[in-house]
Amino acid sequence: MQKTTKPNKHLFNGFSVPDTEQINRALAIIAQIPDDPHYFRPRGIEVAAILMEFNVDLNTILAAILSDPRLAHLDPLPDIKEQFGETVAALVKDVNWLNKLTVYSLEMTDQPRQTETLRRMLLSMTQDVRAVLIKLAYRVQRLKVLPKESYELRRFIAQETLDIYAPIANRMGIHQLKWELEDMAFRYLEPKSYLRIAKSLSDSRAQRENCVNKFIALLQEKLAAEGISAKIYGRPKHIYSIWKKMLRKQLDIDELYDLLAVRIIVDSLTACYATLGVVHSLWQTIPKEFDDYIANPKENGYQSLHTVVIDSDGNRIEVQIRTQQMHDFAELGVAAHWSYKEGGKHDTAIAKNIASLRKLLKETGPERDRKEDSDEALSENFRSELFNDRVYVLTPAGKIIDLVKGSTPLDFAYAIHTEIGHRCRGAKVNGRIAPLTYTLKSGDQVKILTAKDGGPNHNWIDLNLGYLKTSAAISKVKSWFKNQQQAQNIATGKAILDKESQRLGLKMISLAELAKHFNQPDTDKLLEAIGRSDINSRQLAAFFKIPELEAPPAPIQRKKPEIKSAIVVEGIDNVLTSLAHCCSPVQGNDIIGYISHKKGITIHRKDCENIMHLGPEKQAQLISVNWGAKKASYAVPIVIHAFNPQNLLSDVTQILAQAKIHISNAALETHPDFSALLNLTIQIENTDQLSQVLNKISQLPNIVEAKRKT
């Protein structure tokens, strides 16, 4: 008979009776999982035990227990939403997604942009940021059982931890998890260095504790004599941070002076400076190591006094002095400690939302009970303000592309490479064909379908049609068309110059001299100017001092595309036709075609005088024709966002009526802020017509935006 997991219920003391009942129900589900002695991965209950140290809320504990990977093997699967509510079910879903994510690769260690993009992607795709905290606890537990795994897997997990998860913990202001993740990962990556530092710290532990205790006792006595109330304690140094400082300063651990650190918490701003005076009066200072971050806060808002002193035994001790408010500001993450540790710039949205996160995590007792609505609002606030403008999309190879929110597969193609964008003809999103106007979401995997040659479409740069969102991609398309125009002008200019040289009887023309004469920087610019008619035949003739012929040739005209009419010739449409000027037939007239040797088939009215008086030999050139079908129209959904609904429908329908565009469906939505959304389905003939009408609607004073609905 298989053994089953027997969770320790005493781990979860301190919850109310109703909360304890829910925890027991979750533990009962976990208890159904058969115990496997060879299963080395983290278990939900172990992760929940780690999170208890952070005094988290009930939903976080339940989600940690129920996101145990082994739960997937139960048959039937428990209905978490029905038993524990929508919030817990959503958290479990997010944690399971994070646990299964396989985007990271070791190559990202040398690609700081990719690691940063992955960190932001993980945070942005998590519906409730508490799921990230649970994931960090899973990673701590994963590191604890890592010795049982292979050498390669140990190094992979450890490096991923340093590159992705420790910085996320730091960014969220959860420094205890950050230090634990860093030290454990460092132990697997650099075991010899880890053990050497750990042994050195262990050997000097008694000496360091004695030194710090002696320092604290003397300082406490002097501060009390000055009437200053203070809380003083030694601040531990972590092995990974010591290692990084050793590398940065190129020093051995015995040469580092700031392994001894003391923090002093006082009641007021005045007491900070008074305490600093006492410290400096008792011990020798190192002037270059003094920083006043109270008078001059760091860019991220961090405030504290930092100084380094030398005690009577010659030990260097780092001292931090701050008020309780300053301490809370730093410890809760609002100071955005990651900004100066990781080299980023301060972001007020990050600071604000980390504070919201920490408030969400720390609420306990009566404050925590029955506050799911508030919790969800705080969590959504964290996500919406921090990541409201970005999406993170994957290539088929797993590379992450950071795009502006609202980007399309076409934007993605141009972000990969300009030529891929130019030759893009389609896209697969998550394995399925998607339109080029599809709005990408974080986590989508995109494969671009390209042609061997070709270029972009003019419609791509029409913002109303929704093909492109990013300004960089739009700029690349415009540049392509500009280059094509330049190439065409150069070819036209060369043809004109060749014809002029023949007309003037010149065997050779010096393009360099010609370019210099007309103030053109090079020969290509010269030919382009001739092709644009900026330099004409008269000017060229004047340069060569040869009299111009009486009848200069007409400038070369670009060949216009042939336009095929909607006439059907004996059952075959799309035949080249032209309408006769003598009778000007229009749709509805009885018509007949006349086969011309120069103009194809000319369309006449049957009662046209010229047709009526044709001789017998020319009547053989008549052919039966009729009007083809009317131009096809297509149903296109559009959406119009307005400041208010007043006269919205009448104003829009008036514009559509003037454009002779039929409305097949309409729905008006009004919102609590008095704004309005008008959804229409209109019949249009082509994209030019659609663009024109959307532009006209956008010009109405009440309109925020008018666009094609994707």
Image (cartoon, rainbow, N blue to C red):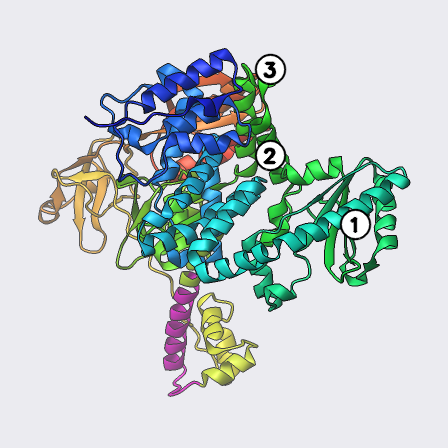
- The answer to whether 585 appears left or right of 145 in the picture is left
- Range drawn in magenta: 485-509
Which quadrant is the C terminus positioned in? top left
Q: Is residue 277 magenta?
A: no
> How far across and how far down the image is residue 252, in percent?
59, 67
Q: CA distance from mark 3 to mark 2?
A: 23 Å
Q: Which residue position holds label 3? A: 366
Label 2: few (<14), some or many (≥20) within 10 Å?
A: many
- Label drawn at residue 353: 2
Q: Position of residue 13 (x, y in %)?
A: 50, 21
In the picture shown, does residue 382 fall above or below 21?
below
Viewed as shown, does residue 442 lie left or right of 650?
left
Q: Nearer the viewer, mark 3 or mark 2?
A: 3
Mark 1: few, some, or many residues within 10 Å (few <14, many ≥20)? few
Residue at position x 22%, y 42% in the image: 603
Return the disc, 3 or 2, that comes first in the chain's sequence.
Answer: 2
Q: Which residue is mark 1?
A: 296
Residue lying at 48% horizontally and 34% vertically, measured from the top left: 50
Q: Nearer the viewer, residue 111 or 28?
A: 28
Q: Residues within 10 Å of mark 3 (few under 14, many from 20)?
A: few
**In the drawing, what numbered circle is on residue 3?**
none
The answer for how far apart the CA atoms under marks 1 and 2 are is 24 Å
